Image (tube, rainbow, N blue to C red):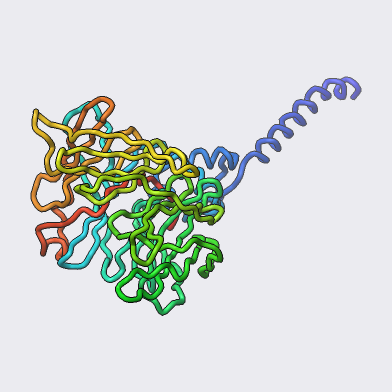
């Protein structure tokens, strides 16, 4: 027995070691539906999810409560948005059809073959909405579009093709204008609503009220207690949100003579006035607000010498602007007549488009002024749209072209 006992000691140790290993393995295994699988750390799951398309993540919402919790987590939504911002982004086109009184929204993935003088791409049609009598819309802001009348304001995600309704604004006025902003620090969206006061004697009515709503956090609009007297200046230049600051054109008096730019910090909800730079008396197109190297910029074409002017806000506190001037580019030795600047993309290229679209082929130009290189992109899917309201009119005005449409998990 002594011999057996002495010989069994290693055996016992081996068995105990194997049991410990099995227990360790069992602790590292989970069970779903009776099947064992390795437990993956949540941090690793999040990294894997960040690289997946939105359509795949939408399916994962139904896999388990744990998956849905990860995908809908605010920090994950924010990090997914930040990562998708480094991927190829789309342009958002807004067309106005005066016959039907509708806006039509399309997106276009920017071609990556930037060295080619000519290429093609396919536009995706998203939706249409009324613009009369409510004439404003928020352009694409980090993947979302805000649109609709005050009684039924909506936020639309082109990636998921889903919308959410915002709370109704408790006001008898119909002259309301809304702006969508994004705070990259907290990762939240806010909608600013401006309610016009009663205009007297044909003059402009300054803003009577300003209200704010934080998407996903609030069920009612909050009154802004302190804001400078102003009102929206015209509807030809949609607002723009850059690095957490919302910018739009503003009138400072009821006669409409004193004009400026207004900035609204989305995080602090503070307003700042920015003086307008001196502008030429004869500009062919209304001013377009765009972003240039992360700064607010004004883009317009100048007649009659076919120049393109780009004014960049270098210091908002000091109201300092820099000016860049370019001549209309040429293709095959011919000036690109009929094309006008609408925006600047991240690479520093100017996007030029016609004022409207009526016949094939429809195209836009990407002009790199530093390299003096212009490339033409033919776009399919716009003139071919099969929609009764679209097809009853052969001409559609281009209201805006905005870059920066990115993948976003909101409204998923």
Residue 201 quadrant:
bottom left
- Comparing 216 with 44, the one in front is 216
Where in the figure is residue 141, as x and y percent of width and height? 40, 51
> Where 96 falls versus 243 (above or below)?
below
Instruction: Tell me which residue sits at (41%, 64%) in the image.
Output: 164
Look at the picture and state if 149 lies above or below 287.
Answer: below
Q: Residue furthest bottom?
A: 172
Q: Nearer the viewer, residue 38 or 131?
A: 131
Name which residue lies at 53% across and 65% down. 224
Q: Give how far across and how far down residue 266 sits, in percent.
A: 50, 53
The answer to whether residue 63 shows anywhere in this view is no
| Residue at the far right in the pictured view | 2
Asked if 329 appears above or below 6 in the picture, the reply is below
Q: Is residue 131 left or right of residue 276?
A: left
Which percent across, then down, holds residue 295? 41, 40
Q: Residue at 50% across / 55% down in the picture?
A: 271
| Towards the viewer: 189 or 372 | 372
Residue beneath the point at 19% across and 32% down: 375
Q: In the rendered picture of this protein, how many numbered marks are placed on residues? A: 0
Q: In which quadrant is the N terminus drawn?
A: top right
- Answer above or below: position of 55 versus 346: below
Q: Which residue occupies the foreground of this view, 384 or 3?
A: 384
């Amino acid at each position: 027995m002594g011999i057996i006992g002495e010989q069994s000691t290693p055996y016992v140790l081996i068995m105990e070691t194997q049991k410990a290993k099995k227990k360790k393995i069992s602790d590292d295994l989970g069970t779903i539906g009776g099947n064992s699988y390795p437990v993956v750390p949540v941090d690793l799951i999040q990294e894997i999810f960040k690289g997946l398309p939105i359509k795949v993540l939408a399916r994962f919402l139904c896999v388990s409560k744990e998956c849905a919790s990860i995908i809908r987590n605010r920090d994950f939504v924010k990090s997914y948005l930040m990562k998708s911002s480094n991927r190829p982004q789309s342009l958002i086109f807004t067309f106005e059809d005066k016959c039907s009184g509708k806006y039509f929204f399309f997106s276009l993935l920017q071609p990556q073959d930037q060295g080619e003088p000519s290429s093609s791409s396919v536009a995706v049609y998203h939706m249409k909405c009324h613009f009369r009598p409510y004439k404003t819309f928020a352009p694409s802001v980090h993947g979302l579009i805000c649109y609709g009348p005050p009684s039924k304001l909506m936020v639309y995600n082109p990636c998921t093709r889903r919308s959410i309704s915002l709370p109704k604004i408790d006001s008898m006025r119909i002259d309301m204008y809304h702006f969508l902003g994004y705070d990259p620090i907290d990762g939240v969206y806010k909608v600013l609503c401006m309610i016009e006061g009663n205009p007297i004697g044909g003059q402009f009515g300054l803003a009577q009220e300003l209200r704010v709503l934080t998407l996903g956090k609030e069920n009612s609009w909050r009154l802004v207690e302190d804001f400078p007297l102003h009102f929206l200046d015209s509807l030809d230049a949609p607002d723009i949100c850059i690095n957490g600051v919302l910018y739009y054109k503003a009138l400072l008096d009821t006669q409409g003579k004193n004009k400026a730019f207004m900035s609204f910090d989305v995080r602090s909800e503070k307003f700042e006035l920015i003086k307008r730079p001196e502008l030429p008396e004869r500009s062919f197109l209304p001013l377009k607000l765009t972003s240039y190297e992360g700064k607010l910029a004004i883009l317009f074409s100048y007649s009659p010498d076919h120049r393109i002017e780009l004014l960049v806000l270098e210091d908002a506190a000091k109201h300092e602007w820099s000016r860049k001037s370019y001549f209309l580019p040429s293709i095959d030795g011919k000036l690109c007549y009929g094309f006008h600047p609408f925006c600047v993309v991240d690479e520093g290229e100017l996007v030029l488009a016609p004022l409207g679209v009526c016949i094939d082929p429809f195209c836009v130009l990407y002009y790199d002024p530093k390299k003096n290189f212009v490339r033409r992109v033919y776009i399919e899917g716009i003139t071919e749209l099969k929609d009764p309201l679209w097809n009853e009119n052969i001409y559609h005005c281009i209201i805006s072209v905005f870059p920066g449409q990115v993948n976003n998990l909101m409204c998923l």
